[in-house]
Image: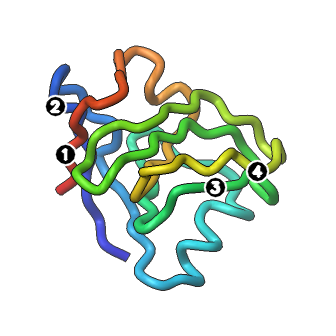
Amino acid sequence: MDERRAVHERSGKVLAESLETPRTMFGRGLGLMFRKTLEPGRGMWIVPCNGIHMMFMNFPIDAVFLDGRGRVKKVYRRLPAWWGIVPLEWGAHSVLELPPDSTRDIDLQRGDQVTIG
């Protein structure tokens, strides 16, 4: 897995200091399932991806769906553990899975640029 960071360009705020990026289809499918927690400042960038589920998730997350150019398509805050299937986000190319409340103080708007690198 690669380690990267995600920054919301308009505000300059860091969404995640360290992003895991699963390289295989199995890794993308497994995602954060079965983990006990996701530490503040960490996250997972799943690419390609336009839909997620919360089954076998032991903690809530914030999820930020991005298009192929890294622009925000949809933001979900505090998706509950074991909640079920999140609707597919048409036009999304990837998703950032972040600790709960990671996006609370960031005014993420549809079309905002997120830089991952």
Q: Position of residue 93 (x, y in %)?
A: 40, 58
Task: Identify the amino acid type marked 3.
Answer: Ile
Q: Earlier in the sequence, mark 1 or mark 3?
A: 3
Identify the element where label 2 is drawn: loop
CB-based contact (under 8 Å), mark 4 and mark 2: no
Q: Is residue 70 above or below residue 15?
A: below
CB-based contact (under 8 Å), mark 1 and mark 3: no
Identify the element where label 4 is drawn: loop
Q: Which residue is mark 2?
A: 9
Q: Distance from label 3 to label 4 (Cα)? A: 6 Å
Task: Identify the amino acid type marked 1.
Answer: Thr
Instruction: Spot the residue most to the front.
Output: 90
Q: Is residue 39 above or below residue 28?
A: above
Image-based side of 83 in relation to 16, left or right? right
Q: Earlier in the sequence, mark 2 or mark 1?
A: 2
Q: Distance from label 1 to label 3 (Cα)? A: 21 Å
Q: Which residue is mark 3?
A: 52
Q: Which residue is mark 1?
A: 115
* Residues packed near mark 2 inside 10 Å, few (<14), some (14 to 19) or many (20 plus): some
Q: Is residue 31 above or below residue 25?
A: above
Task: Identify the amino acid type marked 2.
Answer: Glu
Q: Distance from label 2 to label 1 (Cα)? A: 7 Å
CB-based contact (under 8 Å), mark 3 and mark 4: no
CB-based contact (under 8 Å), mark 2 and mark 1: yes
* Quarter occupied by residue 61: top right
Q: Which residue is mark 4?
A: 85
Image-based side of 4 in relation to 26, left or right? left
* Residues packed near mark 1 inside 10 Å, few (<14), some (14 to 19) or many (20 plus): some
**For this rendering, which residue is in front, 13 or 83?**
83
Q: Residue at x 36, y 56 (%)?
A: 19
Q: Distance from label 4 to label 2 (Cα)? A: 29 Å
Q: Distance from label 4 to label 1 (Cα)? A: 27 Å
